[in-house]
Amino acid sequence: MEFAPAPHNPSPPSASASAPGHNPAQAAVRALLFDADGDDRALEPAQIDGTRVGERQLLWVDVEDDDAGGADALLPDLVQRLGLGEDALAILRERGSTTRLQNVGDWFLAQVVAVEHEGQLRFGGRVLAIVCGANFVVSLHRGPLALIDQLRDRERADTRIGTLSAESFAASLLDWVVDSYLRAVSDFEAAVDRLEVAVLSSRVHQECLPELAQLRRGASRLRRMLSPHRQVFGSLARPDFRPSEDGVADRHFRALEAHFERAMDAVENTRELVVGSFELFTTRSAERTNDTMRVLTFVTVLLGSLAVVVGALGMNFKAPLFDSGQRGFWGAIVAMLVIAVVGTGLARWRRWI
């Protein structure tokens, strides 16, 4: 039995609901029915019925929770409408801050952590739980999630998403999560490029060291957030997880695992970028130190040469030069100036200074 056609809503589908006595501002439920043979349309929460979704339809329910866990009051009704079974409520309420994958027969739960770049190389994680059943997918997250909003904004007109299976659509959502890490890596690489340009500039400041430390913390943060997903994506790609006759979902999950491995390689590479930037910084600092030591060496040699002249003039023996009076004095001054100018010119020509 399929949903009856409803008037098409050209605006971005969105619906909010709450349980009786619950503040609607604390949790929001947005339901969207993708229909391959009709119009994609938004559904009111009271219209959600997992048993009435047709073969060429796909129901997506997005639940945005608040920090206080306001969606817990909505879960019992949602579990009943989707026919998830008696154990589903306890499983959904166990959402924590770590990744996990749980197969419950007719449906499965995949919990992942999407990364959001808050600026200044601060990467925050937001947990996304995805429930995949028969022709329906439920996404649960606490607070707004950028990738969910981007996906909803992209699908503003009628689409062919209704032809996808629930497993394939869940794989697409998980792929968006992997993309969030690749976008974070792109932001990280841009920060590294800006730092290296500053290091290679004519003036190298010690303020680069705190930024290098911040880069190192950001690289470690990305790796700690992404690496726990290896078990989730690896398990999804195994043939025994969701076996099907056509194998379409299996291919999508294998492609998802390959995308995850590429993202993991990119995140691992961020640490190498930081090490390379630090080596560039130390090389540039050593070069400036060498320049300083070269100048100091030249000044020492020049002053030593002048000291030789002064020492010779101060020797205690009679010579016609010492009886020349004021003329001899100014002659010695001119000689020392000539030595200083010639020495400086020679050093500039040989690029010692």
Image: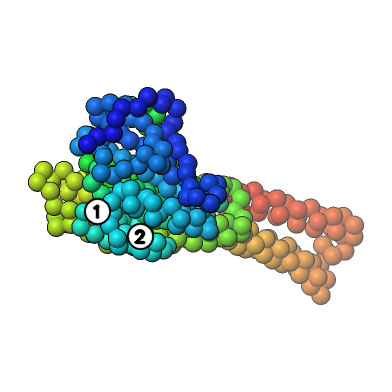
Q: Nearer the viewer, mark 1 or mark 2?
A: 2
Q: Nearer the viewer, residue 304 or 66?
A: 66
Q: Quadrant of residue 332?
A: bottom right
Measured as percent of width and height from the top left, residue 222 is found at 42, 57
Q: Disc 1 or 2, which lies upstream in sequence?
A: 2
Q: Residue furthest left?
A: 245
The kind of residue on which mark 1 rests is Trp
Graded by Cα atoms within 10 Å as few (under 14), some (14 to 19) or many (20 or more), the crowding at tag 1 reads some
Please identify the residue farthest to the right as the structure is shown.
326
The answer to which of 212 and 19 lies nearer the viewer is: 19
| Labelled pair 1, 2 in contact (Cβ < 8 Å) | no
Above/below status of 219 relative to 17: below
Element assignment for label 2 = helix
> Residue 57: which quarter of the image?
top left
Give percent across and percent down for residue 291.
58, 57
- Regarding residue 39, the answer to whether it shows in the image is yes
Residue 107 is marked as 1
- Residue type at mark 2: give it: Leu
The residue at 46%/55% (across/down) is 73
- Residue drawn where x is 45% and y is 36% of the image: 14
Residue 72 x/y as whole percent: 45, 57
- Picture quarter with the N terminus: top left
What residue is drawn where x is 44% and y is 44%? 29
Q: Secondary structure at mark 1?
A: strand
Q: Residue furthest bottom?
A: 316
10 Å neighbourhood of mark 2: few (<14), some, or many (≥20)? some
**Residue 97 on image: x %, y %:** 42, 62
Query: Which residue carries the number 2 mark?
Result: 89
